[in-house]
Image (cartoon, coloured by chain):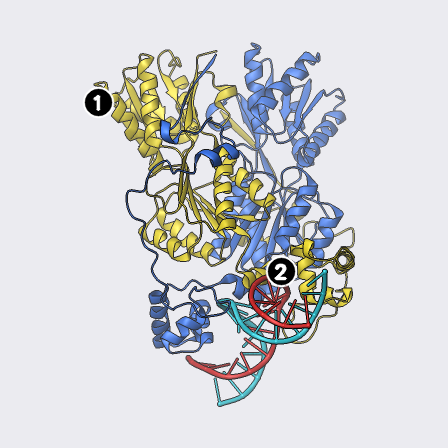
Chain colours: A blue, B yellow, C cyan, D red
Amino acid sequence: MVRALSWRPCRPCAQPAFFASFTTFMASSRKPTASRTAPRTAPRSAPTPAPAGRATGSVTLADVAKIAGVSPITVSRVVNQPGLVSAGTVARVQEAIQRTGYVPNLLAGGLASRRSRLIAAIVPTIANSIFADTIQALTDRFSQAGYQLMLGLSGYAATREQDLLAAILSRRPDGIVLTGIAHTADTRRRLLAARVPVVETWDITPTPIDMLVGFSHEKVGQTVAEFLHARGYRRPAILSASDQRAESRRLGFLDAFGRHGITEVPSSIVPAPSSLGLGREGLARLLDGGARPDVVFCSSDTLAQGALSEARARGLKVPEQLAVMGFGDLNFAAHTYPALSTVRIDGPAIGRTAAECLLARIDAREVGERIIDLGFEVIQRESA
Amino acid sequence: MVRALSWRPCRPCAQPAFFASFTTFMASSRKPTASRTAPRTAPRSAPTPAPAGRATGSVTLADVAKIAGVSPITVSRVVNQPGLVSAGTVARVQEAIQRTGYVPNLLAGGLASRRSRLIAAIVPTIANSIFADTIQALTDRFSQAGYQLMLGLSGYAATREQDLLAAILSRRPDGIVLTGIAHTADTRRRLLAARVPVVETWDITPTPIDMLVGFSHEKVGQTVAEFLHARGYRRPAILSASDQRAESRRLGFLDAFGRHGITEVPSSIVPAPSSLGLGREGLARLLDGGARPDVVFCSSDTLAQGALSEARARGLKVPEQLAVMGFGDLNFAAHTYPALSTVRIDGPAIGRTAAECLLARIDAREVGERIIDLGFEVIQRESA
DNA sequence: TTGAAAGCGCTACCAG
DNA sequence: CTGGTAGCGCTTTCAA
């Protein structure tokens, strides 16, 4: 059913296998695969010869200052607060900067000013991720404000978040964006001790570490349940990844159906992160286990799409015989799955709002706390 | 056809609209939506009272040294090269570190040692991106080696890459991973001037800036063309994003079909980045323009999926009447589109290999250049 | 195996 | 508007 044709580079530079291990690659790649045809652009000799001792050889503020005939602090001002320097001086300094190719050293700047202009964000993963939009929005807003986003991938284990946090904290970020509200006590303690502004996102709690921008997953589960119940579904099932937030949605879902007297809700829990394969397997397990649901609520669109495939493979009509509900609206539902309903989260809004919270806090050194609920949207598509 | 139910937070904390603008949010969010029920964990008072002057109040190496009864340099060694310190001293120092909650300051460390332990990577985007796997692999390998990855999103404009690079260079990364080989002359010059190890990825050229790990997009286009031609397709069309690499594939494709005497290849170019909507539109434009292809080669799986939707909407049988070929194998083809063929790239291998190249260079300060071609794989699926 | 001194490149804090 | 001085917290170098 699947045929593959793999193409490998020509003989002299071929790797032993497509999935070359590094050992292999090291062994065979000593000779470059293509000889250099054009000579490499010769690195320009450093304008200022490297001084003795520990100097790096790269252009410093002092070098620029000397050339422009001003003091280092004036160059610093031209770079950071040009408004405080006379136009003539600015011009002179800027020309010197151009000539020397000066690149400010933010390690030094950050050390001296205790502002790293760095903001860290921790997300579980970026692989076909619902967080991608949020990250993009954060990146955009922060770079516009002169900050850089440092992304940390934590996976779905809280312990990795802890290690990651240590690495991040040692860079002295001016702010931190976290995904979710489930952190170890240690994480919480360190964050508080570091006295760094924090925004938790994509979830909600009355007791955030600092600030929070998100929505209630329990409410999502409840709303979806009510929504489905109102449309006549009475045999719900759940296909969920073993993820904190997915679990909250599941509980909300069970809760709401329970209040309608429906307590038998077969659930299939698959390991995070979601994949299409897990979606297929999960639904298969559900059905093979004897469940005969009329709707299955999946914890992600990815899982939902896998479930759709499995349903189709089994000849089930969707949504007539089995309706499928996803979560995330990864933009796929809209175009390819007229039968898939889902829950849309405004990822960019979460990012933008979180960024504003952080920037406001950084600027004003405010102490106020904020919890912002951005809500969500249930999207139903009838079959085309 | 689409019905939406949006849920907003309860009255007192409701945002005026689901897509709340920040101005609006600022206006309404002054009162937190939930009052704090549990008292916040009180930040522990700093073990060492903040000294006068510019001191930050956070624990420093000197603080730990004083408590452990050793010199600062010994603490530094315990943290960075424990092998050089006697076991007893290590224990004593580590206890002091625990007690004080000391977090090393890598800004200071990086400044002093001229090694930031930071590696930057620039990718166009992370939204349902073929680069996600590569990024994950880079992150994994680097964090294991004690480096942190700093991700920059450049979009698809070379000028933004330039700005981003300036921001990145000012953090003095120990290495840089670039996506693609198309950079401005200025970018190239700066990179060379910074004397920082660079790996270009996801493409190939005989004249990289420094090192390179990728494959030939032209070859992909050629191989796909040969593949399709061998299977009897004679009326190819192209649906491609306006992206440098996609364009290379397109040219290779045209070239190979041209050699078989087929020169009429209708092309539809859509703006990058790809989306399902653009895929639908692109195919629609192709067909409405009078093209009657028997196969369409899309520059990404996302575009291909959109094209599939459009084909279905028009009642075309896939692949009997119109075969669809994608690129990237975003793991969707395997499970949901038995009719979709694609080209698989081993993203993780690119990441791993690029990481090894960089680490080797950083360690050894080698000057050698390397070009590594990892190839690709054409995957054909017959209809289920 | 440990330590003293001297910076890394930049900015805060006053003076002028 | 501009500059001198004194660090930011760490690591390098060299000596003990």
Mark 1 or mark 2, whichever is nearer to me: 2
Q: Could you tell which of marks 1 and 2 lies nearer the N-terminus?
A: 2
Residue A369: give x, y in percent of width and height. 67, 56
Left or right of B306? Residue B360 is right
Q: Chain of mark 1?
A: B
Q: Secondary structure at mark 2?
A: loop
Rounded to the nearest angstrom, the CA distance separating label 1 from label 2 is 62 Å
In this rendering, does residue B20 appear at all?
Answer: no
Q: Is residue B73 above or below residue A341?
A: below
The residue at 32%/55% (across/down) is A42
The residue at 59%/63% (across/down) is B108
Q: Secondary structure at mark 1?
A: loop
The residue at 61%/23% (across/down) is A278
Residue B67: give x, y in percent of width and height. 77, 66
The front one of A284 and A321 is: A284
The front one of A125 and C9 is: C9
The residue labelled by disc 2 is B105
Residue at the outermost top position: A315
| Quarter-of-image position of residue A310 | top right
The residue at 57%/65% (across/down) is A111
Tally of marks: 2
The front one of A187 and A373 is: A187
At label 2, the amino acid type is: Asn
The residue labelled by disc 1 is B263
Residue A342: give x, y in percent of width and height. 57, 29
